Amino acid sequence: MARRYLCHRMVGVPTEQNPGSPDVQPGTTDHQPLDLSGDLLGSRRRVLRHAPATKAPAKRRRSRLSVFSLVLVMLVVWQWGNAGWILVKAQLAQWLIAQAWENSARPNQAIKPWPWADTHPVARLRLPEEGVDLFVLEGAQGNSLAFGPGHLQGTALPGEGITVIGGHRDTHFRFLKDIQPGDALYVQTRDGRELTYRIEQRQIVDSRHTPLQLPDYPASGLVLVTCYPFDALDPNGPLRLVVWASEVNDAELMPTQQPYPQQITEKGSLSFSL
């Protein structure tokens, strides 16, 4: 009875006609009554069938993936921009150092590559076979080594005694990885002299226990120092590669021989960072 009552009370819903009406045969209706239970069940089925609950996790995953992708792209762009700026800065520094070298060669005086620099070029180091052409800066401290190999203060300048030059293994002194005894190095001094050096020996030392030992007699030689090994993950390891070279004439570029006597004296430490 309640269901029939509700059907009659629904607005706009056709109901059963009076069986006595002449327009309608007994037992027939013009429209079927609204089946509330069936409609509710059908609506429920439609709701369950189209419920967004099953799609929400997928949308959230896509949203998170989009945010992650955006952050990754921004990080890559930032890294590229940073690397590009470092490259541009390094190239600009090399151009300024080259200009300072050209300007200092004529009056034979120290010229800073930029006004606030605390270093200046003192020599030019070349190894044509390996495409090496480097300006040696004064001082083997970190701010000088960032722009080129550095002359260890307290040792002689090229052509005036034993010269010690340090450089980073992963940049300017990377070529030392393949250099061998008998190879020739060429150094130009600030006064325009061209010096030739022959590689005599390579040795690996522990900077914590082995001091830098130089001959105590007048000689003209070159000592190149860099970190070792070249592929080490720790940039501050204690090992150093020390390459010894002696000054020779071009005609003396023959098979190597030991250039330094056994009598040596301690001149410093290899503990400086390269």
Image (cartoon, rainbow, N blue to C red):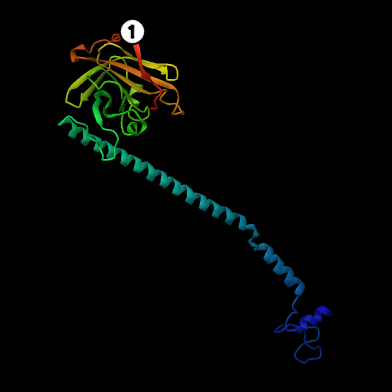
In the picture, the quarter occupied by the C terminus is top left
In the shown orientation, is residue 162 left or right of residue 272?
left
**Residue 104, above or below 45:** above
**Residue 16, above or below 87:** below
Furthest residue in direction bottom, as rendered: 22
Q: Residue 217 sits in which quadrant?
A: top left
In the shown orientation, is residue 268 left or right of residue 219?
right
Q: Residue 151 sits in which quadrant?
A: top left
Q: Nearer the viewer, residue 6 or 164?
A: 164
Q: Amino acid at mark 1?
A: Gln
At which x and y percent is residue 83? 37, 41
Furthest residue in direction top, as rendered: 262
In the shown orientation, is residue 136 left or right of residue 10?
left
At which x and y percent is residue 64? 55, 52
Q: Residue 89 sits in which quadrant?
A: top left
At which x and y percent is residue 244? 31, 16
Q: Nearer the viewer, residue 37 or 220?
A: 220
In the picture, the quarter occupied by the N terminus is bottom right
Name the residue located 21 percent from the left edge and 11 percent from the top edge.
252
Furthest residue in direction left, as rendered: 106
**Residue 179, above or below 78:** above
At which x and y percent is residue 104? 19, 32
Residue at the disc numbered 1: 263
